[in-house]
Image (cartoon, rainbow, N blue to C red):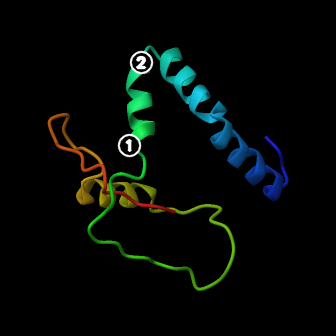
Amino acid sequence: MCCIPQLTHIRCKKSLRDGSALAKWREMVRAQGGDDTWVADVASTVGRHVAKFTLAVRSLRDGFISAFSPACEIGMVAVALGAGRLLASDAVDPAAGVYM
């Protein structure tokens, strides 16, 4: 991976546009023994699910997130919003989540 943030950003956007990022994701799913047929369905629904409520929490200064310690707490907030499961039988809301 490139060490210059601007070039990395350009390369990432290119791989999303040309489909190589999706192809690599499918490859990783298959390499772990997963069924990658659902990946196309997920890719086709991106943007269809919109949250009813949103809350923007903004930084007091410009910069990048280099680390944060409450990762588990953020994950549990996402679960409470419906973005994850505590049990396999729990429902997942495709519009819920945490965006950084």
Above or below for 26 versus 17: above
Whole-percent x and y of residue 60? 58, 86
Instruction: Please report the residue visible at 26 percent of the width from the left and 67 percent of the height from the top.
Output: 52
Q: Residues within 10 Å of mark 2 (few under 14, many from 20)?
A: few
Q: Residues within 10 Å of mark 1 (few under 14, many from 20)?
A: few
Q: Kindly identify which numbered label has been placed on residue 34.
A: 2
Above or below for 68 versus 58: above
Give the quarter of the image for residue 5.
bottom right
Q: Is residue 56 left or right of residue 94?
A: right
Above or below for 25 versus 5: above
Quarter containing the N terminus: top right
Using the numbered discs, state the Cα–Cα distance from disc 2 to disc 1 in whole angstroms: 20 Å
Instruction: Please report the residue visible at 62 percent of the width from the left and 35 percent of the height from the top.
Output: 21
What residue type is disc 2 on? Gly
* In this rendering, the label closer to the viewer, 2 or 1: 1
Instruction: Please report the residue visible at 51 percent of the width from the left and 63 percent of the height from the top.
Output: 100
Whole-percent x and y of residue 23? 59, 26
Mark earlier in primary sequence (2, 1): 2
- SS at circle 1: helix
Which residue is denoted by mark 1 in the rendering?
45
What residue type is disc 1 on? Thr
Whole-percent x and y of residue 41? 38, 32
Instruction: Please report the residue visible at 39 percent of the width from the left and 60 percent of the height from the top.
Output: 74
